Amino acid sequence: MGRRPRSTLKTAVVASALLALTAALLVAFVLRLSSSPDAKVHLGDTTFEVGQVRRLAPLIDRDGPLLFADALKRRGRNLFVQHVGDDATTGWLAFEAQSPGADPTCHVIWHQDRGVFEDECSHAMYGPEGPGLTHYPTEIKRQKKAGLVLFVDLRSPIPD
């Protein structure tokens, strides 16, 4: 009763070998694809949920734009979220905290007293809306429990 027929055992061994081979080929395919310079690999969400606009707008108006260190935790892309205007449902901007083409160690910093951004390496100045910096689309969505929530779409920068 405890012994399996030889044909069942052979089938199990062959099936296991085929499964292992398939898994190895799949891993090799994914690694090869992801290392291709033309590949666009999206592992995870590319939309960043910032928070409730009615809470964020007064905070930004008082203390200045919010800086998020690498919002998606994988690209080394630090992001400013800025609000301009009096209406919490409009005037939202999101842009990189680095000048285009700048050295990765150089960041743009906010000067609350002067109301400007400054590249800490080149000392280039940017107005409060981040003109000349890489911007991303923002969208406000109504959620049942949270109300109006701001999202930033990090898939495609907005062309100048």
Image: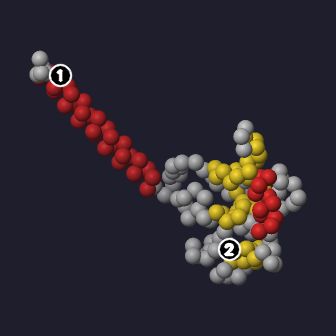
Question: Label 2 crowding class (10 Å Cα cut-off): few <14, some 14-19, many 20+?
Answer: many
Residue 45 on image: x %, y %:
58, 48
Q: Relative to 121, is 81 above or below?
A: above
Q: Amino acid at mark 1?
A: Thr
Q: Quadrant of the N terminus?
A: top left
Q: Amino acid at mark 2?
A: Val
Determine the image quadrant of residue 143: top right
For the point 16% across and 26% down, the residue is: 9
Q: Residue 92 versus residue 10: which sits nearer the camera?
A: 92
Q: Relative to 142, is 71 above or below?
A: below
Determine the image quadrant of residue 142: top right
Q: Check whether the beta carbons of the residues at disc 1 and disc 2 lie within 8 A of each other.
A: no
Residue 128 on image: x %, y %:
80, 69
- Which residue is situated farthest in the right direction here? 86
Mark 1 and mark 2: span between their CA atoms? Answer: 66 Å
For the point 11% across and 22% down, the residue is: 3
For the point 87% across and 54% down, the residue is: 87
Relative placement, left or right, of 151 versus 43 is: right
Q: Residue 119 versus residue 84: which sits nearer the camera?
A: 84
Q: Quadrant of the C terminus?
A: bottom right
Q: Is residue 8 visible?
A: yes
For the residue labelled by badge 1, is the local secondary structure a helix, a strand or a loop? helix
Exactly how many numbered labels are in the figure?
2
For the point 68% across and 54% down, the residue is: 50
Q: Earlier in the sequence, mark 1 or mark 2?
A: 1
Of the numbered discs in the image, which one, if any, rests on residue 8? 1
Q: Is residue 134 visible?
A: no
Residue 42 on image: x %, y %:
53, 49
Which residue position is annotated with label 2? 108
Image coloring type: secondary structure
For the residue labelled by badge 2, is the local secondary structure a helix, a strand or a loop? strand
Residue 97 on image: x %, y %:
66, 68
